[in-house]
Amino acid sequence: MKTILIYDDLMGRFDFGLDHPFKPERAIKTYELLGRYGLLGHSQMTVHKPEAAAGSLLESFHSPSYLAALREASLGRVNLEILACGLGTEDNPIILGIYDWAARTVGGTVFGLRCLLDGDATRAFNPFGGFHHGFPNQAEGFCYLNDIVVAVRDALARDNALKIAYIDCDAHHGNGVQDAFYDDPRVLVISLHETGKGLYPWGGWENEIGRGPGEGYNLNFPLEPGTDDEIYRFAFDEIVPPVVSRFRPDVILAQIGADTLISDPLTHLKLTNLGYRRTVEEILRLCPLVIALGGGGYDLYRTARAWTLAWASLNGMEPVDELAGLVGGMMYGPEKEVGSLYDYPYLTKGEVKERAWQEARRVAAYLKGKIFPILGL
């Protein structure tokens, strides 16, 4: 097994602003934890500093006019064309240097996927990637460029016969990715996310199943607020393994956003990192080649712990605290979790749990009745 961690300390220091919830610093915190828990420096591991994707590569998805507007915004300029592209909003502020930073997130994902397909690695992790809300002409939801779509299109341009599965575990629906491949049977798109009834991007319904030749290759599993590890496991197991196994992808891109976790300030799901790690490990069982992308996660320290566990799983390792007995306290968790990367188990109760179960069972039955016959399951 060969693994690649796509990481650059300077990218982790990029600042979206004091009041903005997106903190690239979480990658730095993750890297520090990887060192503490013996998850760096092994012979199978390579750390790669990403380079900016060329404009010609970005144009495989994004329009030249949008890229020009993003370059202008990156210089601190403001005009009507820039504002019309969704730049300068609360979610997507105008930030000096944002074009290069976003292009490097794309470059990292493209590099990781190419390495997998060229046989240079079997697994990769780009904590800076996973910007699934980006559209050709529009910035949305903290996403200035869509590294996922660009990387997948790059792979398909190199080999038109590839079959690629995209599994999105972020709490927010991956609307930009869905839209890009909605009629393409070469790309299986699966998204498990909090229902759009109360969370951006307000969609991702179970009846959005693809169009034309892509019908049956787009699966959404909206989850109710309060969904915990138990319900999430049911949702994942009912749909993802049978569908992916039937599809038989050459490679999986997994957006492993940590905003599904119990303390995330922007979402309402209640997973622990026990359930989170179990999901990552189940994805790894579905295909030999997997690239994981960071995505969401707005509790800085809990995200760092979840991503540390994900990198451990990608390498088939168990974290070991190399400072145990020497340094007191756990620097990335609440006081009650001192000395461990792992959360305590948690299960939702009462009417919230009952409603979440009812909806999960309903959606699972709908998807199995609607999509499974199309796929021959």
Image: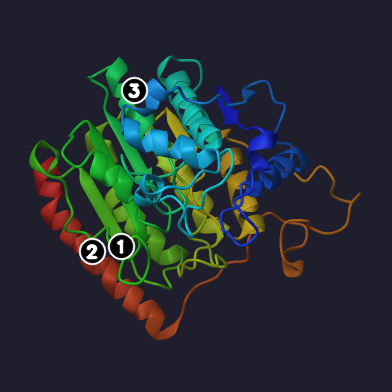
Reading the chain from its start, which is encountered first: label 1 or label 2? 1
Say if residue 22 shows up in the picture: yes
Mark 3 burial class by Cα count in 10 Å: few <14, some 14-19, many 20+: some
User: Are the residues flagged by discs 3 and 1 in contact, CB closer than 8 Å?
Assistant: no
Question: Is 40 above or below relative to 333?
Answer: above
- Viewer-side label of 2, 3: 3
Q: Position of residue 100 (x, y in %)?
A: 54, 32
Is 302 left or right of 219, judged from the image as shown? right
Q: Position of residue 160 (x, y in %)?
A: 23, 19
Q: Which residue is mark 3?
A: 155
User: Are the residues flagged by discs 1 and 2 in contact, CB closer than 8 Å?
Assistant: yes
- Viewer-side label of 1, 2: 1
Q: Which residue is mark 1?
A: 222
Question: Is 306 above or below relative to 360?
Answer: above
The type of residue carrying mark 2 is Val
Q: Which residue is mark 2?
A: 363
How many numbered discs, if any? Answer: 3
The type of residue carrying mark 3 is Ala
